[in-house]
Amino acid sequence: MRIRSAGLLAGTAALALATACAGGGQEADQPQGGMVIWADPERTAVLEPFAEEFGEANGIKVDVREVAVDTIQADFVTAHEGGSGPDVLVGAHDWIGNLVQNGAIDPVQLPQEKVDALNDVAVEATTYDGRLYGVPYAMENLALIRNTALAPEAPETVEDLVETGSRLKDEGEVQEILGLQVSQTGDPYHMQPFYTSAGGYLFGTGDNGAPDPSDLGVGKPASVEAFERIAEFGEEGEGAFKRSIDGDNVGSLFTQGKTAYFVTGPWSLAAVQEAGVEYGISPVPGFEGGEEPVPFVGVQAFFVASGSKNKVLAQEFVTNYVTDPELATALYEADPRPPALNEVAEKVGEEDADVGAFTDAGANGRPMPAIPEMDAVWDPFGKAQAAVIGGADPKEAVESAAEAIREEIG
C-alpha cells in the first residue's frame, strides 16, 4: 500500500508527463475515432485483449497506455488541463475528490441492476456527493497474517497478540512482537484499525453518509484517549508498535520468521507464499474492552474522463465491459484482490480461501475518505502517531496534528 501523500496533484516533470501522455513516442491526443485508456503496469496487459475486442465491435482503435502508478493521477490531471488526457482512467477511489474538484472526471451512467451486482462498500467508495463517479472492480483492506507454526490461534484482542508475541520473543523464537509498519513519520493507513478500536475517528459522517470535513475527529478528547491507548503498546510500553519497523523491512520480518504477526493487505500474499510460511488470515484485532476495529477499504475503479472526445464509447466501455464477469476475473487473476463484482467474488471466494478471509477481515471496514481534505491528514497525523509511539505526550501530539490539519484545510 499505497499511502497517498499530500501534494500529489502538484504535478510532475515535463519529461515524465510527455512520456506518459505520448505513450513512448505516440501522439498524446487520441486518434480520430479512437479511444485511449490509461492504466498502471499491472492492469495494462490484462486490458489489451478486451480493449481490442471492444474496438473491433465498435469500429475504432482502442489504445491501452501504461503509466507509472506513482504518477498516473498527477499526470492525468495535468493532461486533462492541457486537453491531451485519455478517455478512460484506471485508478484508486480515493482520487475521486481531487479529480472531481479539478473537473477531470464525469459521473458514470450505470444502470441500477449493474449497481446492485456490485459490492455495497465498493459502490459507496466510488460515490461522491451523491453521484457514482467510477465503476469498481477490486477491493483491498488490512488483515492480520500470522505464522501458524508459531501462533496457531488467531488472537481475539491486541492484548492476546502481544502476550503471545512477547512470549515468543522472550523464548528467542522471534525478534519482534508484531510486524506493523509505523516508520519515523508514521503510517495512518496501517494504524487505522487500532486508532478506531481505541475510540478515535478522522472525520464525522454527514447526513448523506459521506465524510464531513467540518467534523474533524483529530484533536477531540476521543482521539487523545486513542493515542494514550496506542502509547501503551509503543516503545516505552509493551514494545509492539515500533518506529523502526517500516514498509521496507516489515515484509521480510515476517517471511524470515522474525515475527509471528503481520498487519498487511492482499498485496503481500505472493511474498508470503513464495517464502513457504505456513499462514492464517484473520481480522486485525482490537483492544480489550475497546470498539470493533474499522480498517480502511480501498477500491480500484474505472473512470470516464470529462475531457474525453469519445464520451459515449467511454461510458459504454466502463459500464458494460468493466462489469463483465470475464474481465473482472482476468483483473483478479492478474492481481489477486477481492473482486467488487459480487458474482465473481463469490466464485473466487469458493476457490481461494485467502480472498474470503480478507473479505471477512474487511467486513467492518469503511472506504478511505475520498474528500480532498483527506490530503491534509496523512502527514501531520502520521507524524503525531510516530511521536506518541516513540514516547511523546499524546495530548500535545494529537492537538498539534489537529492544528496543522485545520490550517491546511482552511
Image (spheres, rainbow, N blue to C red):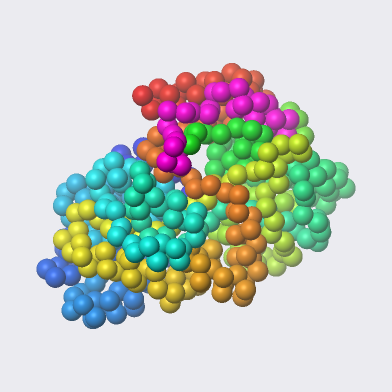
Q: Residue furthest top?
A: 396
Tally of marks? 0
Q: Is residue 218 above or below residue 128?
A: above
Q: Which residues are magenta?
A: 206-235
Would residue 351 be seen by someone viewing this image from the given angle? Answer: yes
Query: Quick check: is 188 in the magenta stretch?
Result: no
- On screen, residue 74 versus residue 387, left or right, reads left
- On screen, residue 8 versus residue 314, left or right, reads right
Q: Is residue 13 above or below residue 265?
A: above
Q: Is residue 250 above or below residue 63?
A: above
Q: Position of residue 3 (x, y in %)?
A: 48, 45
Q: Position of residue 409 (x, y in %)?
A: 38, 28
- On screen, residue 194 versus residue 8, left or right, reads right
Q: Judge by depth and name the residue closer to the eye, 348 or 234.
A: 348
> Which quadrant would residue 256 be assigned to in this image?
bottom right
> Which quadrant would residue 316 be assigned to in this image?
bottom left
Q: Residue furthest right?
A: 171
Task: Pick the quarter of the image with the C terminus.
Answer: top left
Q: Position of residue 296 (x, y in %)?
A: 54, 47
